[in-house]
Image: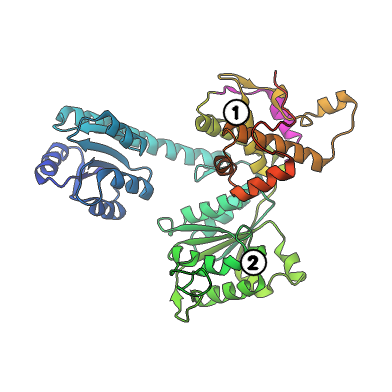
Amino acid sequence: MRRPLVLVVDDDDSITGTLEILLREAYDVVKARTGPEALSLARSRPVEIVLLDVKLPGMDGLEALGRLKELDGSIEVVMISALDSAEQAVACLKKGAYDYITKPFDGDELIATLSRLSEGLKLRSEVEFLREELNERTGLKYLNGEMISKSPAMRKVFGLMQAVSRTSSGVLITGESGTGKELVARAVHVMSDRRERPFVPVNCGAVPSELMESELFGHERGAFTGAHQRKAGRFEYADTGTLFLDEVSTLPMHLQIKLLRVLQERSFERVGSNSPISVDIRVIAASNARLEDEVAAGRFREDLFYRLKVVPIDLPPLRDRKEDVPLLVEHFLEKLSKKCGKRVEGVRPEVIEAFMGYSWPGNIRELENLMERLVVLAPEGGLIGADDLPLGMLSDEEEASGSEAPDLREAVRAFERRYIEGVLEKTNWNRAEAARTLKIHRNTLLLKMRELGLKGQGASGPGWKRG
């Protein structure tokens, strides 16, 4: 079995030499004197553990720690410092360090720390192996820590994703809003040989049309009013990696022509320049509109459509994969309980029954948003029950009330208002923070607030029933 590889980073050769002698019986050891040198070694070698000095020339240890974690979140880092500072130790741990040890360090203590780390890494590897075994035997799939399904429709999708990830062919992902198109794109990228390179997403519908050309291709200084300096575009940022074009159907026609040329020639010019820039990029596009209909209506170029649709992946709506609802509820409950710092025991059977009978027009995004609301409002250590659900979600309540079911648009509007109001209350009506939580632009939030009558702090709306 391969021994764990430990990277020792310190500009003091006596320290690195001592550590190499101390560790070489149980570990393979490589050494670096600076942060950049450590990053270079971590990119080229299968480093699992890093012993990192806080005080380094140039890039300090804290910055190097952050860069290492960005490079590979599974690398475990033990910080070493001559300063016995609780404040510095907390800063290191917050940045992702496994432990903080002060000089002069105790050899036995360090060996014990690394032994615990090695056992943890071994256990993590075994869990991943067993999870893959379980996936193969049961059809239950975990991709990129998020994609969860056992439905036949999604198993076909996973097969397509795994097949296309071994190529650089273009992919067109279609499906209703909220079905997880960006998640599929990220998973294809992570499974490909470009996984170490950039994944650059662009929501084409969220960028004003007059700014989209500069956003994608960049511009030269003076190319237009306000262009005070040269700017690189998303295509340059994504070079050697993957560019994800979400809501590609919203691209203006003149940019569709330029995108087609880039896909054909693998080069482009910045706005205001005649110098071509060559790129090696995989393009994954997504749309919740049927591009065939957009082509027929003359709003989307047919040649671009076929260029993007080398491998089509169509995501089924949640209503067509109801067997996944209990799995998703369990997943979101665990994920959101950690996010909210709250222990919620689970959901009662009548909640799952209500979820299975609901059509989920907003798909998985709607389910996740609802679960976050339920977790936020749930009592510590309690269970989520029927009384916690939005009015109208339980069919028994509708029948007992003797009233007609509410108009769908009104029901969605009422739920949207309650949910946004809950996030605003949670963030003390800090609109910028609320927009980040909702994963929408601040201007979109302001428009929604005006549309839904949420005028400011203390705005009231329909409540949620609670027991």
Using the rendered view, name the quadrant where residue 464 is placed: top right
In the image shown, does 380 or 148 lie closer to the viewer? 380
In the image shown, does 442 or 386 lie closer to the viewer? 442
Does residue 223 appear in the picture of this structure? yes
Does residue 179 appear in the picture of this structure? no
Using the rendered view, name the quadrant where residue 417 is placed: top right
In the image shown, does 341 or 214 lie closer to the viewer? 214
Residue 137 is marked as: none
Q: Position of residue 428 (x, y in %)?
A: 57, 32
Residue placed at 33% from the left, 49% from the top? 67
Instruction: Name the residue furthest left.
Output: 14
Q: Secondary structure at mark 1?
A: helix
* Image quarter in which the C terminus is found: top right
The colour scheme of the drawn protein is rainbow
Residue placed at 52% from the left, 25% from the top? 342
Disc 2: which residue:
251
Compare marks 2 and 1 and give the one earlier in the sequence: 2
| Left or right of residue 241: residue 91 | left
Disc 1: which residue:
375
Asked if the stretch drawn in magenta spans residue 10, the answer is no
In the image shown, does 276 or 165 lie closer to the viewer? 276
Residue placed at 43% from the left, 59% from the top? 194
The reply to whether dot 2 and dot 1 touch (C-beta < 8 Å) is no
Q: Which residues are magenta?
A: 344-360
What amino acid is at disc 2? Leu
Q: Secondary structure at mark 2?
A: loop
Asked if the stretch drawn in magenta spans residue 356, the answer is yes
Q: Position of residue 143 (x, y in %)?
A: 52, 45
